[in-house]
Image (cartoon, rainbow, N blue to C red):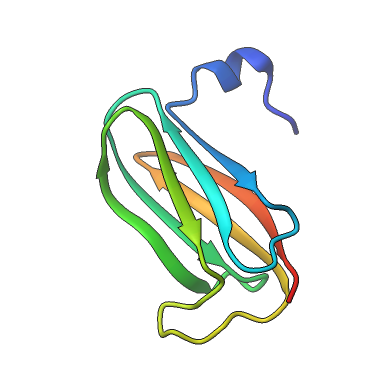
Amino acid sequence: MEPRPEEEAVRPVTLMLAGPCPAHSVVQLRLVLRRSERVHVGVYDLFGRRVRTLLDGTVAAGTTALSWDGHADRGSLASSGVYFARATWGSGRATLRIPLVR
């Protein structure tokens, strides 16, 4: 079910792919907050396993640039495939599909 435009307008956090798509090396993400929020942003594989933590803390209102270099938290290079960036805050969540091509 797609969110209605008025629901989208009141979301406190928006997660967007800033480019490129599909990604070959570095993925640029934009996190837009309407107010200061404690936010966790992670990259997950198709099985829901966390690959990388991009952000975990309180972020001021406005736009925050994030990037994922295609590496896991332990330093290994992620293989080609589909990944998901997920932002969670309070009682909300936003998910973004990231195709990665090596």
Quadrant location, the C terminus: bottom right
- Image coordinates of residue 7 in percent, x first then y, are 58, 19
- Image coordinates of residue 11 in percent, x first then y, are 49, 25
How many marks overall? 0
Q: Is residue 59 left or right of residue 28?
A: left
Residue at 43% from the left image edge and 44% from the top image edge: 65
Q: Is 4 placed above or below 84 here?
A: above
Quadrant location, the N terminus: top right
Q: Is residue 86 left or right of residue 25?
A: left
Q: Is residue 62 left or right of residue 52?
A: left
Between 31 and 10, the one lying in front of the other is 31
Residue at 67% from the left image edge and 70% from the top image edge: 46
Q: Is 67 placed above or below 61 here?
A: below
Residue at 51% from the left image edge and 62% from the top image edge: 68
Between 40 and 24, the one lying in front of the other is 24
Residue at 62% from the left image edge and 45% from the top image edge: 17
Q: Is 42 placed above or below 34 here?
A: below
Between 47 and 66, the one lying in front of the other is 66
Q: Is 73 placed above or below 87 here?
A: below
- Image coordinates of residue 20 in percent, x first then y, are 68, 52
